[in-house]
Image (cartoon, rainbow, N blue to C red):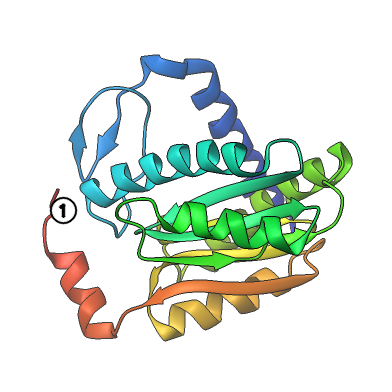
Amino acid sequence: MTSRTSRRLAALLATLAAATALGGCAPLLLGGAVVGGSMMAIDRRTSGAQIDDQTIEVKGIKRVNETIGDRGSVSVTSYNHIVLLTGTVTNEADKTAVERAVGAIESVRSVVNEVAIGTAASFGNRSSDTLVTSKVKASFVDAKDLQVNAFKVVTERGVVYLMGRVTEREANRAADIARGVSGVTKVVKVFEIVTEAELADLQTKPAKP
């Protein structure tokens, strides 16, 4: 990792630590509007979609727990109503059941089920994954030709999942950058692809609820 990327990574980690320390004291920014809570970066979703995604994730975890109990460890990540499931369960039936349960949540458009059959990740695995996610985001910042807030990065045992509303060029560029980050074993694109014209329209229109 270059010294510039190291500085970017340090800055990102410092920002994350500061946000965690502030807790409920920081204002929540959605689509350019402060609504109370904690800071949320402006991205290419509407403010309504951002709130929906948070709701989907909370409901998703609840349904996962109700469906499999302690028979696995599954994470639920939603971006613009597209849900990514990662983690592990003990058998194929539970993997299918989790997907069905989360897919039934109102406003979920589709589910990408990347849950593996096996044992849960260790603390070391999770720590390594957190570091990889931070390094990937820092590399996006260094790239200059990508808008880092347009991407959501999820890492599971070295496999990096990339989400967001991006163009084909942005999707390929981000995947190429992520593949070059140390600790990344594979990159999976879970993007919602938009055209260059649609992107220009997103960037010129004010955010809508």
Badge 1 density bin: few <14, some 14–19, many ≥20, Cα 10 Å? some
Residue nearest the observer in this picture, 187 or 105: 105
> Could you say where residue 154 lies in the image, as x and y percent from the top left?
61, 55
Vertical relation: 85 (above or below) 131:
below
Q: Percent position (x, y) of residue 119? A: 87, 50
Instruction: State the image coordinates of residue 111 (x, y, percent, origin top left).
Output: 48, 65
Please tell me which residue lies in front, 159 or 22: 159
The percent position of residue 80, horizontal first and vertical second, equals 34, 59
Horizontal side of residue 209 vs 97, given as left or right: left
Kind of residue sitting beneath label 1: Ala
Residue at coordinates 31% horizontally, 79% vertically from top-left? 194
Name the residue rendered at 81%, 63% in the picture.
182
Describe residue 159's horizontal placement relative to residue 125 as left or right: left
Q: Which residue is mark 1?
A: 207
Residue 113 makes an appearance in the image: yes
Residue sitting at x 21%, y 46%? 31
User: Mark 1: which secondary structure?
Assistant: loop
Tag count: 1
Res 71 quadrant in image: top right
Q: Judge left or right: residue 89 versus residue 99.
A: right
The quarter of the picture where the N terminus appears is: bottom right
Q: Quadrant of residue 82?
A: bottom left
Q: Can residue 148 be seen in the rendering of this structure?
A: no
